[in-house]
Amino acid sequence: MNTSSMNSTHTESARQAIAHVRADASVQPLRTHLESVGGLAATFAAKFRLQKHGELIGLLHDLGKYSDEFQSYIKSATGLINQDEDEDFVDATGLKGKVDHSTSGAQLIWRELASRSPAHHAIAQVMALCVASHHSGLIDCLTLNPGRPVEDGFSKRISKEHEKTHLHEVVSRMELAIRGRVEALLEDADLTNGLLLWLRNLHDKAPGASKEEKNQSPSQKLQQGLLVRALFSCLIDADRIDSADFEYPGRARHRYLGRYEEWDALVQRLERHIEVFPSVHPIDALRRDISDHCCAASARPSGDVYSLTVPTGGGKTLASLRFALHHAKRHRMDRVIYVIPFTSIIDQNAEVVRRILEPEGVQSGSVVLEHHSNLTPDKQHWRSKMLSENWDAPVVYTTMVQLLETLFGAGTRGARRLHQLANSVLIFDEVQSLPINCVHLFNSAMNFLVDHCRSTVVLCTATQPLLHEVNPSRGAIRLSERHDIMPNVAKLFDDLKRVEVSYRRKPGGWSLAEVSDLAIEQVNEVGSCLVIANTKKVAQAVFQLCRQHPDAEVFHLSTGMCPTHRKNKLNAIRSRLQSDAVQPTLCVSTQLIEAGVDVDFGTVIRFSAGLDSVAQAAGRCNRNGRRTVGMVYVVNPRAEDENLSSLHDIRIGKEKAEGVLTDFAEDPSRFNGSCIGPAAMSRYYREYFFARSADMSYPLARDVTGRDDDLLSLLGANEKAASDYAQNHGRTPPPLRFRQSFMTAAKAFKAINAPTQGVIVPYSSEGTALIADLCAAFLPEKEFELLRRAQQYSVNVFAHQLDALSKAGAIREVREGTGILYLADSRYYSDEFGLSDTPTGLMEDLHG
């Protein structure tokens, strides 16, 4: 390392360099922070065989804090010096976030490595990107500004004037211990060889028969970007942990940092539960057989993709957990991560597993972590940094939205979790719910984790999508040669058949009154009926019609209800359905009830939708085989009653499903006698995926890039941006190995098309008290626990509804600047429908 500018007279100043100052005026020395972050980042990066890279970027990430400019700023801002007593005092008010302390570390890496060889150039760019981006999220290598020329954003950042980054000054002020370790790492051959081996392996595993095909694979280019994000994740998590633990020392002792209970203990708890599991219904024997096959399959190799294709009601939750725990134990894996499509079923599944793995005497929350809160805003500040989860638990339950944000989202909050996916078992429950525009991104990411990070993926569903049959160059998931955990899926579907599906298509469609009459008729005949609509509006209308009939207790379920509200409704429904005495029960719901909710109705009426939705709806009918057969009626509503114009996925799925159902009615033998079995589902997905192939790479609106492009490209080779750059620079291509527009892509990415924000609602006295406690909670540790509880009393609200509630003055922040919202006017929350953007008048204002 070039030391010509080092000045020994600054030794005392270096010893006094400060990284952070706590509220009680305690000081964290910069050296302590850098060494701690370097050590943590090295530990995290070891999972990727990049331990030395993690240590180096950890040691250099805050190098700029050695500068006089930063030291004067932090001391002035925290009262360590004041205007009257020290000439170094500066007015820090307008300087927050403006003193550059991240670029110099990136410049040092670039200066020392980039010029050595083309290989070193690529290695330097990876590490410099991580350091330069550690506050903002990964920056654009090629910067896209619609209507303006493409810029080389990375080179512009790395060439920033040293007078502004203080490179020479901060290098001269590094402590000898830090400097010596940095020099040793920069000269270590493993630093280059480790990343070169990664890039070679990514190329070798890329789809394509020839070297040229592999080089041009969009999937491989995307995985190169994921490699950068993986290393970036290690740095971000290390930095946030060390900073938070200094600011709030009490939290440090509550971190596990991978030191969990042994897998042996968790396996034993699960096996004891399975041993005493009662066999009440004939289906219970089939569920046990599925569970036993999952246990046996756990001995298969790690680092592969498996499929668990089981009809709804087959006991996938505990069977897949059995696979996961035994597999993690056998292969010494770090954690099990359950990825579930909807928050509505995380509550149910996590609660079941928590009762098993956290019995009496085991600290609550020490094994099972739920992470699906949407209470904190997207933009991160000091409070949400402290509250961020990093999935440090042996068993994690999260949503597909959270997982996709971790892999592709903006900022640093989600990205910090990515390293926790390595050497883990990932169970995807109801994988058919994967958003269609994320198919290639998801497939490539799973291949990355399985092929290169020693992770194991299990795709669980009754309606297995054909993720392995899409375009391999753009990203098709690579299934294991022995991917099926169940040996004879077709026979399993025959053995578990408990329903008949009747396609009741009517010319002109069913009126909502006719659907209501059919539902009441079914309650009178078999005792219970579930109606599932595609939209909240239709579900509410049918509910209002049904409850005019005095013959049954009528319930309504909606995502407008908070989890505790839904749980209470479902518990009441289950109590009636499971009682020995006949208690006529009718429930009208949106599709939230389809995926994994454990209810057992005599009849189900499903508004026409995708065939996967029909099959999932069928799983709520005769679930425990208490009847010879249950009936599922698929009805087509009148066009004037159901508006699907903005629900693109449902509309196309409905069209393709109706084609399969019509063909089935003409010749059931073509589908082995089942319109929701594997043969019919395979036909449905082929037609559905063929119709949606153009949507699978996450196409972007032109206002994002100024051209037709997609996220797969921006996070990969970025061909169009590179071509535009060359046209404006004398046909000279960008001088970069990595050309991704990381930040532009991340800001454009939304795991769901209409992102939501959580609002805490005053459901029951507990919800009201929780809001009051949050409004009064000034201790971060107390707020952290309150927000965990608030997940059960929050509703995820779309932007238009949030805007309406804001204009009505119905929502407020728990405290100004926190971004944590609550419903202040409880007239907008009703027992029937949950949260609404119009007042119900049923309850009084919290502050009235």
Image (spheres, rainbow, N blue to C red):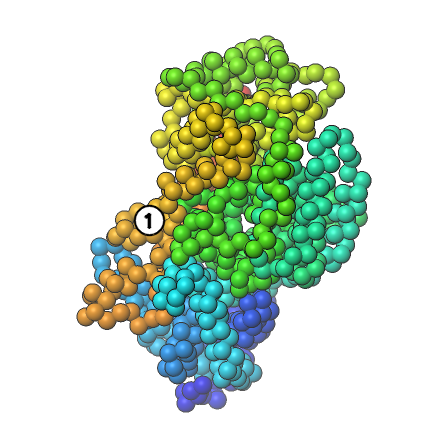
In-front residue for pair 491/142: 491
Residue at 59%, 48% in the rendered image: 484
Residue 590 at x, y percent in the picture: 51, 28
Label 1 residue SS: strand
Residue at 58%, 62% in the rendered image: 454
Instruction: Answer with left or right where residue 714 lies relative to residue 675.
Output: left
Query: Taking 162 as reference, is 147 above or below it?
Result: above
Residue at 35%, 31% in the rendered image: 645
Residue at 79%, 48% in the rendered image: 361
**Residue 772 visible in this rendered orientation of the protein:** no
In-front residue for pair 225/482: 482
Query: Taking 773 as reference, is 736 above or below it?
Result: below
Q: Quadrant of the N terminus?
A: bottom left
Query: Taking 548 as reference, is 323 above or below it?
Result: below
**Residue 415 visible in this rendered orientation of the protein:** yes
Say which residue label 1 marks. 700
Residue 281 at x, y percent in the picture: 74, 29
Residue 489 at x, y percent in the picture: 60, 41
Classify mark 1: residues with Cα within 10 Å, few (<14), some (14-19) or many (20+): many
In-front residue for pair 149/579: 579
Residue 115 at x, y percent in the picture: 37, 82
Q: Quadrant of residue 70?
A: bottom left
In-front residue for pair 798/494: 494
Instruction: Answer with left or right where residue 470 lies relative to residue 676.
Output: left
Q: How many marks?
A: 1
Task: Name the amino acid, label 1.
Answer: Leu
